[in-house]
Image: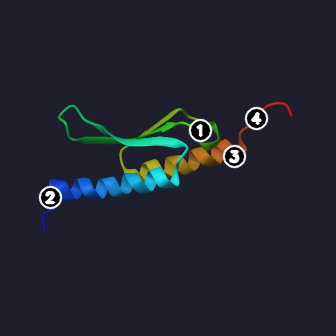
Amino acid sequence: MNETRAQRAQAENEVLDRLRADFPGHAIWRSTRYDDQPGDWVATLRDPAAGVDPTLIRSTPSELRAALINEYERALTRDTGPR
């Protein structure tokens, strides 16, 4: 069965919604390639408690999820300076 463009977009929107719900400290979206096709998956840090790197770019949503988890762990363990 061939997946239509609308079905694919719906599935990707659901993945985006889940990523956004799971990682509210980041603005998450799908970039657009030069040919107007969906591109990379992107997350920009909004809350410093949620990560370290300002922007993450990955090829797949699962790669982005793994990077976001890593960012959260890095944020938890980073040195916050003198106390």
Assign a secondary structure to mark 3. helix
Q: Residues within 10 Å of mark 2 (few under 14, many from 20)?
A: few
Q: Residues within 10 Å of mark 1 (few under 14, many from 20)?
A: few
Cα–Cα gap, marks 1 and 3? 13 Å
Q: Residues within 10 Å of mark 3 (few under 14, many from 20)?
A: some
Q: Quadrant of residue 57?
A: top left
- Residue at image position (50%, 52%) is 66
Q: Is residue 58 above or below residue 54?
A: below
Circle on res. 4: 2
Circle on res. 76: 3
The answer to which of marks 1 and 3 sits earlier in the sequence is 1
**Position of residue 21 measured from the top left corner of the image (x, y, whole percent):** 48, 54
* Residue type for callout 4: Thr
The residue closer to the viewer here, 6 or 52, is: 6
- Residue at image position (43%, 50%) is 63
* Screen quadrant of the C terminus: top right
* Residue type for callout 3: Leu
The answer to which of marks 4 and 2 sits earlier in the sequence is 2
Q: Are marks 2 and 1 in contact (CB under 8 Å)?
A: no
**Position of residue 74 measured from the top left corner of the image (x, y, whole percent):** 64, 43
Q: Nearer the viewer, mark 1 or mark 4?
A: 1
Cα–Cα gap, marks 3 and 2? 41 Å
Q: Which residue is mark 1?
A: 47
- Protein image colouring: rainbow
